[in-house]
């Protein structure tokens, strides 16, 4: 966990064996330079259409089918009356 304590103390080895600080690596990334000693991966898009999901989506807590919405009759069952408008 050195990174969280002091990001400048993180080092990586360059091709010459010199250490690079976190700040140097950060600067190199911002400048678009290659970081010595890192493997360059050849990642390309396959340009295929996404497949249809095979697993059903999990319900959100508010989508639970067992929860009934509060209806006017629900309030009456509890002995409550809906608010009456004072306009008129």
Image: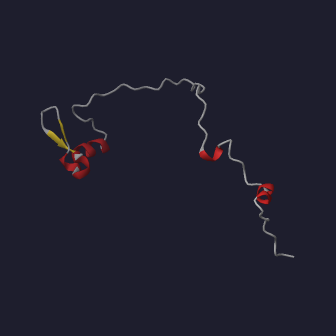
Q: Which of 7 and 15 is in front in this view?
A: 7
Left or right for 37, reference 65: left
- Locate residue 64: give its quadrant: top right
Q: Which of 45 and 76 is in front in this view?
A: 76
At horizontal 20% and vertical 49% (from top left) the residue drawn is 8
Picture layout, residue 42 above or below residue 62: above
Coloring basis for residues: secondary structure
Q: Where is residue 3 in the image (x, y as percent from the top left)?
A: 24, 47
On-image quarter of the C terminus? bottom right
Left or right for 88, reference 65: right
- Locate residue 22: give its quadrant: top left
At horizontal 57% and vertical 27% (from top left) the residue drawn is 50
Q: Position of residue 2 (x, y in %)?
A: 21, 47
On-image quarter of the N terminus? top left
Left or right for 18, reference 62: left
Q: Position of residue 73 (x, y in %)?
A: 81, 55
Q: Where is residue 52 in the image (x, y as percent from the top left)?
A: 60, 26
- Locate residue 26: give its quadrant: top left
């Amino acid at each position: 966990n050195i990174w969280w304590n002091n990001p400048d103390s993180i080092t990586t080895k360059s091709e010459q064996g010199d250490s690079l600080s976190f700040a140097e690596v950060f600067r190199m990334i911002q400048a678009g330079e290659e970081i010595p000693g890192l493997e360059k991966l050849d990642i390309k898009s396959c340009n295929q259409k996404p497949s249809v999901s095979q697993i059903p989506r999990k319900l959100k807590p508010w989508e639970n089918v067992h929860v009934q919405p509060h209806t006017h009759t629900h309030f009456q069952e509890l002995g409550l009356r809906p608010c009456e408008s004072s306009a008129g």
